[in-house]
Image (cartoon, rainbow, N blue to C red):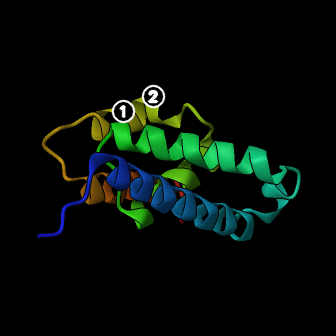
Amino acid sequence: MLQIRRQQLDTLTTAMRHKANLQLVEYARKRFPTVFEKIDEPAAYKLVDHVRTTAERYGIEREDNVATFLDFTVMYGEEFHKARWATDVLSSEAIHAPDKMALLEERARQTGVTL
């Protein structure tokens, strides 16, 4: 029987997160070129990792949802998740993570912002 030890699983998880963060940096550079042209690679990676960690606190882990969380972070600032229009949705345990992001997108759309 094949057994995966905790250390092996942790190594795999770290490698997968690193790859996902690199892809998210690439996404951010394409999505917001004027913002990210001024940010070097280590700083962009650090921002993306911070965004991912913050999103995870709200149960947001699916990659497309993390990308949307990043969109909001770039557009509204690193503390957007604490804003009144976002915090009630994000902190709700009754709302599934993809639905949280859909609700936030709808709230943004109502102000004329399309993601």
Q: Position of residue 3 (x, y in %)?
A: 19, 61
Q: Residue at x 12, y 42 (%)?
A: 94
Write down the quadrant of residue 36 in the picture.
bottom right
Instruction: Report the Cα–Cα distance between label 1 and label 2.
Output: 5 Å
Of the pair 85 and 25, the residue shown nearer to us: 25
Picture quarter with the N terminus: bottom left
Q: In screen coordinates, is 3 left or right of 72?
A: left
Q: Residue at x 46, y 62 (%)?
A: 16
Mark 1, other Cα within 10 Å: few <14 / some 14–19 / many ≥20: some
Of the pair 8 and 40, the residue shown nearer to us: 8
Mark 1 vs 2, N-terminal side? 2
Amino acid residing under circle 1: Thr
Q: Position of residue 46 (x, y in %)?
A: 66, 43
Q: In screen coordinates, is 30 left or right of 20?
A: right
Callout 1–callout 2 Cβ contact below 8 Å: yes
Of the pair 101 and 49, the residue shown nearer to us: 49
Q: Position of residue 23 (x, y in %)?
A: 60, 68
Q: Residue at x 56, y 39 (%)?
A: 50
Q: Residue at x 44, y 53 (%)?
A: 11
Of the pair 44 and 75, the residue shown nearer to us: 44
Secondary element type, mark 2? helix
Secondary element type, mark 1? helix
Q: In screen coordinates, is 74 left or right of 32?
A: left
- Placement of 29 over or under 77, stated as above or below: below
Amino acid residing under circle 2: Lys
Would you say residue 79 is visible in this rendering? yes
The circle on residue 82 is 2
Q: In screen coordinates, is 58 left or right of 92?
A: right
Residue behind mark 1? 87
Q: Position of residue 18 (x, y in %)?
A: 56, 57
Mark 2, other Cα within 10 Å: few <14 / some 14–19 / many ≥20: few
